[in-house]
Image: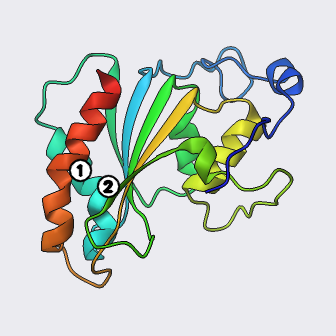
Amino acid sequence: MVTFDRPLVDQRLANSNRMSPQTRSGDPSTKRPEVKPVLIMGIGNILLRDEGVGVRVVQAMQNLDLPDHVELVDAGTAGADLVDIMADRRKVIVVDAIESRAAPGTIFRLSGEELLPEPGASISLHQLGLVESLVMAEQLGCAPGKVVVFGIQPAEIRVGLELSADVANAVPKVIEGVLAEIA
């Protein structure tokens, strides 16, 4: 994975143009609801078996007694909405399927920086995914303070609602890792 030793956007410019977290539209009379500082976000399409593992992890965590400063979000296939969901958070923990050619059910823990493309790379507004949303949030000056991604190698991405056995067996371990991040 690629890591960076400099930010994608000059922080002096980002901070000078940054909107208040309470005003996303730029109009001070339009208040944005307060967001919890820590976000656990599951990404994926539950109609494609293991592709939906991020959503399935968040669903499994809904019955847990989480601290008040933590929010769970089923981001599904949100695309461009990911920017607003992640905006201005202290920490974002993402759970998603990740193609790595590893054994099905293998769990990876990555930092947000490990996912980012080379500085200056262009991004498309069409089919906006997690990486593009992180870049866009950085460019808009509303990037989360820290991003951690738990990626799970899928076994099957085809039509169906159930996780494969290998990926289903990884879910409790992923939840354990996520809980350690918010401790």
Residue 100 position within the rendered picture, expressed as x and y whole percent measured from the top left: 45, 70
Colour style of the rendered protein structure: rainbow
Residue 51 position within the rendered picture, expressed as x and y whole percent measured from the top left: 34, 69
Would you say 172 lies left or right of 99 here? left
Give amino acid for label 1: Val
Q: Which residue is mark 1?
A: 57
Q: Where the C terminus falls, by quadrant?
A: top left
Q: Which mark is residue 54?
A: 2
- Inspect this view and state whether residue 163 appears: no
Q: Are marks 2 and 1 in contact (CB under 8 Å)?
A: yes
Give amino acid for label 2: Gly
Inter-mark Cα distance, 2 to 1: 5 Å
Residue 89 position within the rendered picture, expressed as x and y whole percent measured from the top left: 52, 26
Could you tell me which secondary element the residue under label 2 belongs to?
helix
Would you say 35 lies left or right of 26 here? left
Q: Quadrant of residue 121?
A: bottom right
Depth check: give the residue in front, 103 or 164: 103
Is the residue 66 above or below the residue 101 in the image?
A: above
Q: Where the N terminus falls, by quadrant?
A: bottom right
Is the residue 142 above or below the residue 132 in the image?
A: above
Residue at horizontal 75 percent and vertical 60 percent from the top: 123
